[in-house]
């Protein structure tokens, strides 16, 4: 069976800068696949390629069996994502924002009310439901972004730093949420700077450095941080040797 | 399209930018027209009275609504342009543009819905200006009631307002390519300046942004009669820029 998220020799550059360099990658059904890397390593670019936000220079980024560049509405209707800024229009209330996301994700009109209520309760946003998003704290805006990404019950979830701005309770909540969705068969592709968080939730951890896939981390391994820096260091050494 | 339209209309209804622009154009603009007309016919002296008198296109309702026409020809382009720039630039400026990708509703459809909402809003504002101008004119008693003349002049006001407003749809393209509302606001200032120059050199009829202003002063000495082709340039430019904007939204990447 084809993996819901799949990349083959995926490459994208910005001018002379190779942001993603020949990456082969997949996320299976019910799998939480995390990518880690330093700032500018290419994590967000990789996610954008899967979501059709960028077109590859070469290679393939496939989502639910379709090329991300020409995926149909049916495919995108099964995808939820949160990349960079949460889906939170400041002039709309929390409820209106989630409703807008539901509409744009083609949730049937008869189901929108129930779907919105479900995620507002799930993300503990009930207290803020009728307030404008502009008054929310950063953490609650992130919760709103996650609620908007999940209101249509996707089967593929792509989240860039989902725990950004969340308090410790929010981080635990997000981790449990990812586990729950993966348990229901959702393919989860997630990035994070926090190795500890990933270790507790991911099935697979890929290290990205300078646009390339340079190694894997064992989620149950000891001292992930040290292993991560060793992989990055070895990659830098290999590049230097190749250039010498 | 229906889903995108519902989202976009909700955003516009909740927006402070649209609210302020509607209030300023709907109320202030006819009030300014009445003020200039009152000064023009007061028989007073001074630079303001002289200028206002020089811009009178007639007497009574024709003169009063002519003043409103002339203000609307510029103010609607600028006022509506700010709203158009905000509608197409806000997702870039607040960095929520990536949220509009990977959706069952395509970005071309979202851009189309933005235009549809803006056109509906422009019609509402143009009619609002005419209604407020009518009420103010009646309250101020600018001239005895003449239904034929008043309705004809109000129709003309709506056409000029709408013409100036639809020209601002071009700012959707500028805000999209410029990835924010500020480039569009800057471009509008340049267009207003270039329009003045085009009119001074007598080529204004072929410069679509000058057409509403020339319509507002039609019949005055030295003002050329606009040909049907020149008039058609206004909706033509608006349609072309909408098509290009939708195309841009379909193909755009997140950078």
Image (cartoon, rainbow, N blue to C red):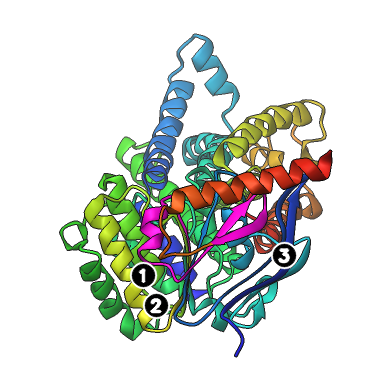
Q: Magenta residues?
A: A190-216
Residue pointed to by mark 3: A10
Please give the chain letter of the residue carrying mark 3: A
Comes first in the chain, label 3 or label 1: 3
Disc number placed over residue A178 in the picture, else none: 1
One can see residue A167 in this view = yes
Within 10 Å of the Cα at label 2, are there few (<14), some (14-19), or many (20+) other Cα atoms?
many
Give A189 or B180, whichever is nearer the viewer: A189
**How far from the left and from the top, in percent, is residue A31?**
46, 76
* SS of the residue under disc 3: strand
Whether residue B203 is situated above or below residue B38 in the rendered picture: below
Residue B194 position by quadrant:
top right
Residue pointed to by mark 2: A182
Q: In this view, does A204 lie to the left or right of B27?
A: right
| Residue in view at x 73 percent, y 52 percent | B237
Comes first in the chain, label 3 or label 2: 3
Pointers 2 and 1 in contact (CB under 8 A)? yes
* SS of the residue under disc 1: helix
**How far from the left and from the top, in percent, is residue B230?**
78, 49
Within 10 Å of the Cα at label 1, are there few (<14), some (14-19), or many (20+) other Cα atoms?
many
């Amino acid at each position: 069976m084809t993996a819901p998220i799949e990349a083959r020799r995926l490459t994208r550059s910005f001018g002379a800068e190779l942001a993603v360099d020949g990456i082969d990658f997949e996320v299976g059904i019910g799998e939480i696949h995390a990518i880690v890397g330093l700032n500018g390593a290419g994590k967000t670019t990789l996610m954008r390629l899967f979501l059709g936000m960028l077109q590859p220079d070469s290679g393939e980024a496939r989502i639910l069996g379709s090329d991300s560049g020409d995926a149909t509405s049916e495919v995108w209707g099964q995808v939820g994502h949160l990349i960079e800024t949460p889906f939170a229009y400041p002039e709309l209330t929390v409820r209106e924002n989630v409703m807008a996301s539901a509409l744009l994700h083609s949730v049937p009109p008869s189901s929108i009310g129930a779907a919105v209520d479900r995620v507002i309760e799930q993300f503990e946003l009930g207290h803020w439901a009728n307030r404008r998003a502009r008054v929310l704290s950063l953490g609650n805006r992130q919760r709103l972004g996650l609620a908007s990404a999940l209101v249509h019950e996707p089967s593929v979830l792509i989240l860039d730093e989902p725990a950004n701005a969340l308090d410790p309770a929010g981080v635990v909540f997000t981790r449990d949420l990812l586990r729950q969705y993966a348990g229901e068969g959702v393919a989860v592709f997630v990035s994070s700077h926090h190795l500890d968080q990933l270790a507790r939730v991911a099935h697979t951890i890929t290290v990205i450095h300078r646009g390339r896939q340079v190694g894997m981390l064992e989620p149950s391994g000891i001292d992930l941080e040290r292993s991560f820096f060793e992989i990055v260091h070895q990659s830098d050494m290999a590049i230097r040797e190749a250039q010498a | 399209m229906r889903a995108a339209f519902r989202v976009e209309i909700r955003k516009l209804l909740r927006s402070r930018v649209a609210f302020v622009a509607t209030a300023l154009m709907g109320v202030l603009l006819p009030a300014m027209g009445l003020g200039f007309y009152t000064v023009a016919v007061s028989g007073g002296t001074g630079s303001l009275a002289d200028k206002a008198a020089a811009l009178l296109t007639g007497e009574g309702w024709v003169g009063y609504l002519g003043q409103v026409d002339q203000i609307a020809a510029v103010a609607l382009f600028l006022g509506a342009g700010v709203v158009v720039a905000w509608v197409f630039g806000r997702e870039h400026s607040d960095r929520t543009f990536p949220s509009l990708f990977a959706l069952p509703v395509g970005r071309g459809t979202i851009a189309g819905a933005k235009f549809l909402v803006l056109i509906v809003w422009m019609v509402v504002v143009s009619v609002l200006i005419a209604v407020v101008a009518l009420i103010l004119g009646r309250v101020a008693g600018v001239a005895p009631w003449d239904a034929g003349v008043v309705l004809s002049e109000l129709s003309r006001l709506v056409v000029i307002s709408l013409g100036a407003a639809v020209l601002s749809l071009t700012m959707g393209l500028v805000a999209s390519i410029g990835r924010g509302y500020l480039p569009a606001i800057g471009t509008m200032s340049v267009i207003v300046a270039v329009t003045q120059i085009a009119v001074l050199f007598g080529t204004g009829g072929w410069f679509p942004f000058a057409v509403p202003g020339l319509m507002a002063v039609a019949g005055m000495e030295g003002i050329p009669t606009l040909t049907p082709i020149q008039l058609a340039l206004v909706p033509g430019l608006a349609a072309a820029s909408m098509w290009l904007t939708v195309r841009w939204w379909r193909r755009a990447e997140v950078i």
